[in-house]
Image: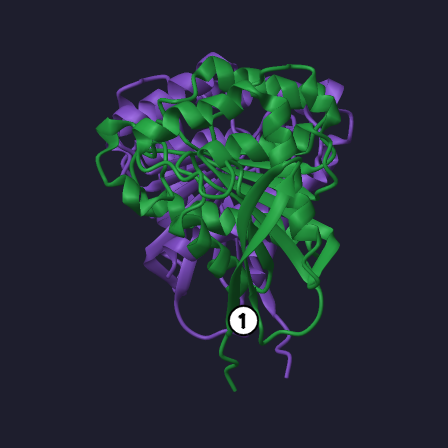
Chain colours: A green, B purple
Amino acid sequence: MTVRAAIHTETVEYKQGDTTLEGFVAYDDAIQGKRPGILVVHQWLGLTDYEKHRAEMLAQLGYVAFCADIYGKDVRPKNTTEAGPLAGKYKKDRPLLRARVNAGLDALRQQPLVDGKNIVAIGYCFGGTTVLELARSGADVAGVVSFHGGLDAPDPTDGKNIKCKVLICHGADDPFSSPQDIAALENEMRQGHVDWQLIKYGGAVHSFTQPMAGNDNSKGAAYNEKADKRSWEAMKQFFAEIFK
Amino acid sequence: MTVRAAIHTETVEYKQGDTTLEGFVAYDDAIQGKRPGILVVHQWLGLTDYEKHRAEMLAQLGYVAFCADIYGKDVRPKNTTEAGPLAGKYKKDRPLLRARVNAGLDALRQQPLVDGKNIVAIGYCFGGTTVLELARSGADVAGVVSFHGGLDAPDPTDGKNIKCKVLICHGADDPFSSPQDIAALENEMRQGHVDWQLIKYGGAVHSFTQPMAGNDNSKGAAYNEKADKRSWEAMKQFFAEIFK
């Protein structure tokens, strides 16, 4: 007998300080009981249908998935021209970025079906940078996964605060992270004795999991079906190791 | 009902030119019909029980596994002092190394249970270097996997000859491949438009899949259980993608 997945979704308002944020939760109604929770952090355009679709895919795998909102309710850039300065604001203000992503983590924890000891955060582009900041904040999560995140090491001594496993899925031809920045990040994790892994996908540039990025690598951001599928499988393997 | 695996193993003599080589084959007698073949290339000590055990593990996964012998029948270094110059001889003579590994590939193909269209080569340390040379030789294999192989790019234009998928599993703290050598290898593959992936395992040094290497990272070569298991899973995922 095949059990048909019944994915429940809803928007969830929550707060960081005085700021109202609007997240999104997805889980399978057909399964009983508590289960691991996955925090999903959006790319620079904010929380879009893309992340919601990923949350539904995660719900189909049996998890409670919660899309965080870093920017705030109704703050949804219309295009990359609007997105750039907004993402830049949070990238420059790492304490605020950490506060926002930790608020999302708290909101995920408050979901009644979440097993609070089994939480992993994943993020795309800006969200990849953000989940690394979540790890550096010392958050009590079991792991973080960055998909084509902007990679750097603003404070090289931060690695020592990371308590969780780290998986970085990166396009080998991504022009937005320099080899020097990646080397600095590796050194941060090395010196922090972090349990980390970095996968480089040949032929992939920035945004390789995102069909809306198109297929022109020369733009520096493009979808790459192979790297998309491989990184999703690597994530599932990472989950399988953690959620034994 | 559980079917108990019945792993058949035997040594296999074969030739490269006038040189007699002694390989080792393993497959599950309890399964019927042709199946993918995995070529296994040894580390610098030559074909040992370590590779034979890996071949048995691959046989249990349902493949025909064939351990190549690069050095020649009865040429089995007793220790690393003897192994160094021998491995060095082949690393300096890449045409000979290619001839030897291709002879192993031919011997695998002659195994009656092998589906010749579905062959992947894997190699450890010296064998990792060797399977990259197999790929560069233009061999008709579907993929190669290097586990803590010595990474370099002796001829940066060689990538264009590679027809197969390449997966490189590397210890992020492996002292035997310089960042410059790894960057050169990445560029070789990039310029050759190869379908390649590189996984770096944090905290792992050379020999991370080999329990006989001990546990002292400061020696530059040591076993790392996490990286061993993760790279084996990555290999299985690589196989799953290829052997659809």
In the depicted view, which residue is nearer to us: B28 or B186?
B186
Residue ID at (40%, 37%) = B101
Disc 1: which residue: B29
* x, y percent for residue B121: 43, 44
Q: Quadrant of the C terminus of chain A?
A: bottom right
Q: Quadrant of residue A159?
A: top right
* x, y percent for residue A39: 59, 47
Q: Residues within 10 Å of mark 1 (few under 14, many from 20)?
A: some
Residue ID at (46%, 20%) = B182
Query: Relative to residue B44, is residue A230 drawn left or right?
Result: left
In the depicted view, which residue is nearer to us: B60 or B175?
B175
In the depicted view, which residue is nearer to us: A112 or A126?
A112
In the depicted view, which residue is nearer to us: A25 or A228?
A25
Kind of element beneath mark 1:
loop
- Give amino acid for label 1: Asp
* x, y percent for residue A116: 74, 53
Q: How many labels, in total?
A: 1
Residue ID at (50%, 43%) = A73
Is residue B177 something one can see in this rendering?
Answer: no
The chain holding disc 1 is: B
Instruction: Spot the residue most to the bottom.
Output: A1
Q: Identify whether B110 is placed above or below A84.
A: below
Residue ID at (73%, 19%) = B219
Instruction: Spot the residue most to the front.
Output: A18
Q: Identify whether A116 is placed above or below B126.
A: below
* x, y percent for residue B113: 41, 65
Q: Identify whether A87 is placed above or below B33.
A: above
